[in-house]
Amino acid sequence: MLELFDGDQAAIGALLAAAIAAIRRDAELLEVLVAANDRPAIVETTHRLKGTGGTIGAQRLVRASSNLEDARPAAASQLFAVVRAEVTKLTADIDAFRAEK
């Protein structure tokens, strides 16, 4: 990421802040969608979450989101728990990274 932004810490910080905000928003939305079993909206939201995660190199979040996106309805709650755990870990890691800078 440093090479992509030519070492510009402010730009990296801004990207991470925007990404985390989007990830948190989508995770909160997914919780509601999974509870409502709204498959089309779950697929749309997990696809967006995968894209945001991929942009910042969060491969574990991308995999977890992909599994939820492709899941049968009966498995959605269990797979959402994995997504939620990845979001929690990722946001903590990014918050810690940003605090160091």
Image (cartoon, rainbow, N blue to C red):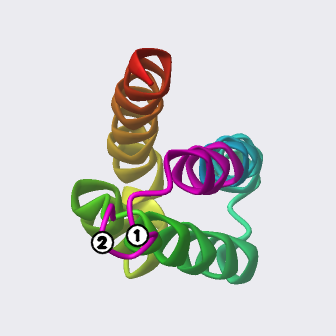
Q: Quadrant of residue 86?
A: top left
Q: Quadrant of residue 37?
A: bottom right
Residue 75 in the magenta stretch? The answer is no
The picture places residue 17, in percent across and down from the top left corner, at 66, 43
Secondary structure beneath dot 2 equals loop
Callout 1: few (<14), some (14-19), or many (20+) C-alpha neighbours within 10 Å? few
The picture places residue 82, in percent across and down from the top left corner, at 32, 42
Q: Which mark is residue 6?
A: 1
Seen in the picture, residue 95 relative to 46 is either above or below; the reply is above
Callout 2: few (<14), some (14-19), or many (20+) C-alpha neighbours within 10 Å? few
- Residue occupying image coordinates x 34% and y 27%: 93
Report the front residue among 2 and 35: 2
Q: Quadrant of the C terminus?
A: top left
Seen in the picture, residue 73 relative to 96 is either above or below; the reply is below
Report the front residue among 36 and 48: 48
Left or right of 1 in this view: 31: right
Tell me the CA gap for discs 1 and 2: 5 Å
Residue on which the image places disc 2? 3
Asked if labels 2 and 1 touch by Cβ distance under 8 angstroms, the answer is yes
Which residues are the magenta region? Answer: 1-18
- Residue occupying image coordinates x 71% and y 52%: 18
Residue 3 in the magenta stretch? The answer is yes
- Residue occupying image coordinates x 25% and y 67%: 63
Q: Amino acid at mark 2?
A: Glu
